[in-house]
Image (cartoon, coloured by chain):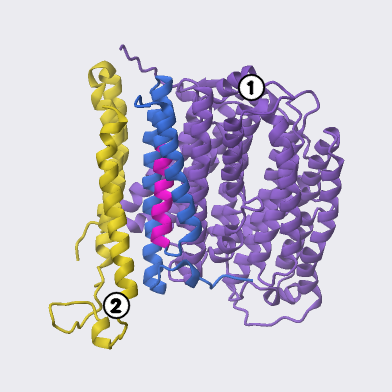
Amino acid sequence: MPLRLVAPEWSLLVPPLIVLGTIVLLLAIDAVSERAARKTALPLALVGQLLALVSLATVDWGQGATTFGVSYRADWFALVVSLIALVSGILSVLVSAGYTESGLEPGVGLAEYLALLLFSVFGTMVVGAAGDLIVLLLGLEMSAVAVYALTAFARRRLTSVEGALKYFLLGAFASAILIYGMAWVYGLTGSIVLSDIAHTLRTVVTPGQPLDPALLLALLLLAVGLGFKIAAVPFHMWTPDAYQGAPTPVSAYMSVVPKVAGFAAVARVLVQALQPLSDQWAGLLGILALITMVYGNVVAIAQRDLKRMLGYSAIGHTGYMLAGLAAFTNGLAGDRSVGSVLFYLFAYAFMNIGAFGVIAWLQERGLGTTLDDVAGLAGRAPLAALTMAIFMLSLMGMPPLLGFYAKYYVILALIEAGQLWLAVAIVVMSAVSAFFYLRVVTQMYFQEPGGTWRPVRTPLLGLGLTLMAVATLALGLVSGPILELAQHWPAALT
Amino acid sequence: MTELSATHFLLLSAALFIIGMVGVLTRRNILVIFMCIELMLNAVNVSLIGFAWELHQLTGQVFALFVIAIAAAEAVVGLGIVMALTRRADTVDIDELRQLRE
Amino acid sequence: MSLVDYAVIGLLVLTSTVMGTVLILVGHFVRPRKPTPAKLQPYESGVPDVNPPRGRITPRFYLVALLFVVFDVEAIFIYPWAVAFDALALYGFLQAALFVGILLIGLLYEWRKGALEWV
């Protein structure tokens, strides 16, 4: 059998390759000289990601070109996912800078930490650009496995290891289910290429007819596996524990980027490959979205620990994003479903990493992570309190902050798809969420401060928080171009 | 009856997968849970090989290779976490891990 | 070979299962139950045991095992290349070299980090 290896189109691969190169460089420097790594790791990680961000402009995404056969797709969807992953990656590095709790002070394992973080960013970019199931799976796992290790990074603290363990066990369990689903899809369609799967399914499935049970099984396995990855109820059990146990910068990171990878995988698998089954999965996603947003927002009310509260609130936000996907109407004109989810993820990156960033900022100053620790913050550090208030109000969906626009576009997509009940549910749940988000604000502004306060300087963290606060304030008003970009998705996925 | 067909692969795979899944859901020892997850992944590999065999393709086999690599990566990170855990807590019983709660 | 030929094996499995189960059950119901501390001890050649029967193993072993698993499994990607070595020619060789090169950086990393030291 003659074999011919075709050289890949390297120019399409520049952004992920820059990230990969940065990782290799980080590890190589750390291996050669730990002292050099201590000095260079942080700037290197920042510069590497910034370069990758800039290099996104060198690729012509509109072509939808593919390389490695059709395994790697450089299309609009890949661009937006890479953009969100890199921006979140940069913000997370800023939040992690100089984090002193549990051995993240500059130097101790910093290169290793940043390499793992960049691996996860890299994996997420790969998921976004995946053209077949193997590449998708590899990206998803790279993005998740690195975060399991990061969660346990404060390994002297038992809660960190416990959170990591729960995250890992459920994540690995979910992966097994997901891969089983992929195996069935492959077996039933004879292909692992996403577009070929859709093509084959179109010939097999007739709308209105009951589905082949094997195909239904494959769909359910995929839905369960991906549901775990994005922390949809009832597959959310790991989320609060992992968020609370992880070092705070890691919580910030993992509340966003693995979720981006998860939603990118959902979009690639369900929207692109299993599009002929959209009648089945859109309804399923709608129901999942409803129970996820209700559960996340209601349980968050009972939380005293801010990280745990944000963990449940993250489940609630997963619900809103799932609702956006449930508005899928086969990529016809006016279908804003996937675009609204991409915009939501983009907005969510700023406000959620920001909220965790403020908690990290407080921990630097010797405070804990409960509601009592933010009491009276406005008197002590008015700017930090203002920043936190901005993030809380934005997560709640207060206009004209970024979070409001995110919800607004999802609701718009739902209304255009005729799913009014989900749109109403989002509005109601946003009102419920006001209860726990505003409680943080009242604690900061109307309570007496307690605990000991240790003033320290954290310039990079401060810079990161400022960037995110400004973005949360202003990006909503100029959200047009970003949304425009996100709405190019039908060209990539259908 | 004696002819080997893809159905045999799939039945074996489904049986292994369900054994693994029940193990994950019922066992309390972290290492046993972990072994059950590995069992599930290998059950998937049997499926993939079976499908590839029936479709006369190599794709499924290549997929299985990557699944093995992913399983190894997960195993290493997971066992690393378990090692960190036994140093701190001296237990591998999942029910004894109750530090994180409401 | 028809299914009937396997019947012997089936018979063997059946017999051993039934016999084992019955013997354990009979023993369980018939034997007198008078436990003393001495009786409950694991048998250790008649000598009273000092350490817990399951001795502790140093975590070093686990570390080495983990590192072994990683590099061991990477070999599965080299086998297919080795099988198609002639057909893939120089370009295939370069790709495999790149793959091994990245692995080497990993090996260098763990060597420099002291993971290979046996203390």
Q: Is residue A482 visible?
A: no
Q: Is residue A225 visible?
A: yes
The crowding category of the residue bearing disc 2, from other C-alpha atoms within 10 Å (few below 14, some 14 to 19, many at least 20), is few
Q: Which chain is yellow?
A: C
Give residue C70's position: percent from left, percent from top. 31, 47
The crowding category of the residue bearing disc 1, from other C-alpha atoms within 10 Å (few below 14, some 14 to 19, many at least 20), is some
Name the amino acid, label 2: Arg
Disc sitting over residue A62 in the figure: 1
Give residue A318's position: percent from left, percent from top. 69, 49
Residue depicted at 77% across the width and 32% down the height: A336
The answer to whether A418 appears left or right of C100 in the picture is right
Magenta-highlighted residues: B30-45
Q: Colour of chain B?
A: blue
Q: Which chain is purple?
A: A
Residue depicted at 24% across the width and 72% down the height: C55
Q: Which residue is mark 2?
A: C31
Disc sitting over residue A145 in the figure: none
User: Which of the image's four quarters has the C terminus of chain B?
Assistant: bottom right
Mark 2: secondary structure: loop
Residue that sits furthest to the top in the current view = A2
